[in-house]
């Protein structure tokens, strides 16, 4: 009862006081309007150059110190606290007025709607002053330098680093509130700029009037802090100075009742969630903020490009900034999620679709989602972007050694492009550190395109021979040619061939300098390309040649530098020089080359051994062992020279030709170096071509040997030792006809007769004449016997 009586007394007292005011609603409205700082004033006009320099410097120094900041911010805190209490009382008072009713207080004709409108104006004032009071008491947090640098990187992505509201201070001298931080970092500059821009009461007159200056400063600061004003400088300052916890608390207090800068607050709240690791919440905030793009000053500034050119819709520019931010923060999953959701909004805008699908591809690839990356690549509508992404897919998967995925993707409508990319990479990078040729080989084999696979490996092997002058390179070359042969063996014989550019063909290289003639004019491009068709047999030859190159390099490491790209003819010379005569003969037989260089080379080595010393003898055993002699004799009685001659004899016996070319070239080599012919070689050649041996003797002026040969040859024709000259039937009436090399014998007699003063030559000449006379007598007798037999 006492409380009820007390309440009734209070109500009666209030009613009696309100009746003294003729129009209380109007009075409250005037009070509310005076306390409302919602304004559209712009404070970006800059300094007025008409003001004296000393006044501008003094005012800047005055408000730049910590003391002035503390005084101004405490004044704002005091004003906000006092007015918060006033607004609280006004809200209570308005509720009481509504309870008392119109008839008691308001009088006739006063609408209740006015009361409700006034209450809706007072409540935001109450909440606004509470926020300012809260900010004036909330302490700022010291931020590590690395956090500030990371934040600056994120702001640079958003292109907000040039904003005055995001200039972070790395050093805080003493604990300060977030309002003091805002004043020192942002508001002070704007307030001083605004004071200098006032046309009335110049600072030269009022600058010394401290009460007026502090009042103007606090009013301007309250305007910048006012929640319902369109600017977001206070929120931007908190974001730029990494005050994320305070910014979150501020937005949570502001969001339930303030409908100004809703999108901006959502965006900044999303940034806070990114810092605290709540990526999904951040993504939701960024999505909700997108609906306010084009309606708020901060978001408009966010999407403004540096050059001022609008390249897409405002919303797409906003999403582009958010995607870039998420990328820099390192949240590829969120980038994919956001880009996928944006695709439903872009509709038929193929440029935006290409950008988004490229973004999805990139981040799937970064995450190792190869299948999803390939799927996103196939859906890119822009062919140039698609080709770039395909190139990136090939390079990245190769670097990760994820070649199975790269080979097995179907590449619908992209087959030629991926082949061209891999070929281009294969021809542009180092052969021993990258395996693009092997990748391309696997790519074609997986699709059963064996001819293409064989072509790839053949090109790989050729480049290895030209560019990789190492033993490992020769090993890989042999494997490449073997793989090419195996590929062609898997094809039907009529299709087992590849096209290979000939050695003299011209290649069209992109970016190559045009060829010019002596006058500086560009030469005409060749109309026809030379091409060479390589069949299975040709590849088998190249494979054999590659194995022989490797054999040579293993036997003689110094030959590695030249063996890789040497032709078959050049390889024969290299093998002969290294003493690998069996291998050289095998190569000649494979490529159907004459064995003349082999026999000449072996003969020369025999000459060197015969004229050389013990060092040459010791060295010769290494290459002699590399050739398969029928039985190598290594006793003291058998020297390396003997074994070399025996090897030469074996070859002459084994590899015979119709015109005895190899005997001729061996004897010619020996005689040209002045080395006496071994008896086994003379006897061997006498059996096959005594007349040619005689001509060789004459060519080298070996007259005495020629005389002995003619004497023996005449005796052999007459039946004495005919088996040593390969004469099956000597001269007789019943045997086939025989003949003598009369032209060579005449040359020999002429050579002997040129020096008639030499008694030895006369004796040799007489010896031949006697033999010939005896031969003629025997021929006459055999002829008479033959004629007699025919006449019977």
Image (cartoon, rainbow, N blue to C red):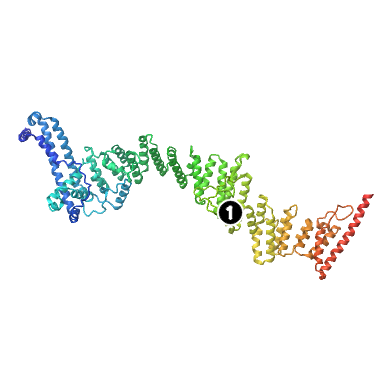
For residue 665, what is the image quadrant? bottom right
Give the left or right position of residue 30, taking residue 242 as reference. left
**Quarter of the figure with the N terminus:** top left
> Measured from the top left, where is residue 574 in percent x and y?
63, 57
Depth check, front residue: 158 or 715? 158
Q: Where is residue 765 in the image (x, y as percent from the top left)?
A: 83, 66
Q: How crowded is mark 1: few (under 14 residues within 10 Å), some or many (20 or more)?
A: many
Q: Which residue lies furthest to the right in this view?
A: 792
Percent x, y for residue 21? Answer: 6, 35
- The answer to whether 50 appears left or right of 709 in the picture is left
Task: Kindly identify the residue that appears in the image at 68 percent across and 64 percent down.
Answer: 609
Question: Would you place residue 67 above or below residue 229 in this image?
Answer: below
Q: Which residue is rendered at x = 53% and y = 39% of the image?
A: 447
243 to the left or right of 723: left
Q: Mark 1 points at which residue?
A: 564
Whether residue 54 is visible: yes
Left or right of 718 on screen, residue 489: left
SS state under label 1: loop
Q: Is residue 634 visible?
A: no
Q: Which of 307 and 354 is in front in this view?
A: 307
- As drawn, 58 above or below 359: below
Name the residue furthest front: 519
């Amino acid at each position: 009862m006492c409380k009820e009586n007390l309440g009734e007394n209070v109500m009666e007292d209030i009613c009696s006081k309100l009746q003294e005011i003729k129009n209380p609603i109007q009075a409250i409205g005037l009070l509310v309007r005076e306390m409302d700082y919602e304004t559209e004033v712009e404070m970006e006009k800059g300094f007025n150059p008409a003001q004296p320099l000393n006044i501008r410097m003094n005012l800047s120094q005055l408000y730049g110190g910590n003391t002035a900041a503390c005084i101004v911010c405490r004044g704002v805190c005091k004003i906000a606290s006092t007015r918060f209490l006033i607004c609280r009382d006004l809200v209570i008072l308005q509720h009481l007025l509504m309870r008392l009713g119109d008839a008691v207080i308001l009088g006739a004709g006063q609408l209740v709607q006015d009361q409700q409108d006034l209450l809706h104006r007072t409540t935001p004032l109450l909440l606004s002053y509470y926020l300012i009071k809260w900010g004036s008491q909330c302490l700022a947090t010291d931020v590590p330098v690395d956090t500030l640098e990371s934040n600056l990187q994120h702001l640079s992505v958003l292109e907000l680093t040039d904003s005055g509201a995001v200039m972070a201070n790395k050093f805080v001298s003493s604990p300060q509130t977030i309002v003091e931080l805002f004043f020192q970092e942002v508001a002070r500059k704007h307030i001083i700029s605004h004071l200098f821009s006032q046309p009335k009461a110049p600072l030269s007159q009022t600058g010394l009037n401290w009460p007026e200056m502090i009042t103007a400063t606090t009013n301007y600061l309250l305007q910048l802090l006012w929640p319902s004003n369109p600017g977001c400088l206070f929120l931007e300052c908190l974001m730029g100075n990494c005050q994320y916890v305070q910014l979150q608390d501020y937005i949570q207090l502001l969001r339930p009742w303030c409908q100004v800068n809703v999108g901006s607050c959502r965006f900044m709240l999303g940034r806070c969630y990114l810092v605290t690791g709540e990526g999904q919440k951040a993504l939701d905030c960024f999505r909700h903020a997108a609906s306010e793009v084009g309606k708020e000053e901060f978001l408009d500034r966010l999407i403004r490009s540096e050059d001022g050119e609008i390249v897409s819709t405002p919303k797409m520019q906003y999403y582009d900034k958010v995607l870039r931010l998420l990328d820099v923060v390192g949240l590829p999953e969120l980038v994919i999620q956001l880009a996928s959701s944006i695709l439903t909004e872009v509709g038929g805008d193929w440029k935006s679709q290409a950008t988004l699908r490229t973004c999805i591809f990139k981040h799937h690839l970064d995450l190792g989602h190869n299948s999803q990356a390939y799927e996103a690549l196939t859906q890119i509508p822009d062919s140039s972007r698609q080709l770039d992404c395909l190139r990136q897919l090939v390079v990245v998967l190769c670097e990760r050694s994820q070649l199975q995925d790269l080979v097995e993707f179907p590449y619908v409508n992209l087959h030629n492009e991926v082949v061209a990319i891999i070929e281009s990479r294969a021809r542009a990078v180092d052969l021993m550190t990258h395996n693009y040729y092997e990748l391309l080989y696997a790519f074609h084999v997986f699709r059963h395109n064996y001819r293409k696979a064989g072509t790839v490996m053949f090109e790989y092997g050729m480049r290895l021979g030209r560019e990789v002058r190492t033993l490992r390179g020769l090993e890989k070359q042999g494997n490449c040619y073997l793989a090419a042969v195996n590929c062609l063996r898997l094809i039907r014989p009529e299709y087992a061939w590849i096209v290979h550019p000939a050695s003299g063909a011209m290649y069209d290289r992109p970016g190559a300098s045009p060829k010019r003639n002596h006058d500086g004019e560009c030469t005409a491009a060749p109309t026809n390309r030379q091409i060479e068709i390589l069949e299975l047999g040709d590849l088998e030859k190249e494979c054999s040649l590659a194995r022989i190159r490797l054999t040579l390099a293993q036997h003689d490491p110094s030959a590695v530098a030249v063996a890789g790209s040497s032709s078959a003819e050049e390889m024969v010379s290299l093998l002969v020089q290294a003493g690998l005569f069996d291998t050289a003969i095998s190569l000649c037989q494979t490529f159907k080359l004459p064995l003349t260089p082999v026999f000449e080379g072996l003969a020369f080595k025999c000459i060197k051994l015969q004229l050389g010393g013990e060092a040459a003898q010791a060295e010769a055993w290494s290459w002699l062992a590399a050739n398969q002699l029928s039985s190598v004799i290594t006793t003291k009685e058998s020297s390396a020279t003997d074994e070399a001659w025996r090897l030469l004899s074996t070859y002459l016996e084994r590899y015979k030709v119709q015109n005895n070319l190899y005997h001729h070239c061996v004897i010619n080599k020996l005689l040209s170096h002045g080395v006496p012919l071994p008896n086994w070689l003379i006897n061997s050649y006498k059996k096959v071509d005594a007349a040619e041996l005689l001509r060789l003797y004459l060519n080298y002026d070996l007259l005495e040997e020629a005389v002995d040969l003619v004497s023996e040859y005449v005796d052999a024709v007459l039946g004495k030792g005919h088996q040593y000259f390969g004469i099956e039937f000597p001269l007789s009436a019943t045997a086939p006809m025989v003949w003598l090399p009369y032209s060579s014998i005449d040359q020999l007699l002429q050579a002997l007769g040129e020096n008639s003063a030499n008694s030895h030559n006369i004796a040799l000449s007489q010896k031949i004449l006697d033999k010939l006379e005896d031969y003629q007598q025997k021929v006459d007798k055999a002829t008479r016997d033959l004629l007699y037999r025919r006449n019977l």
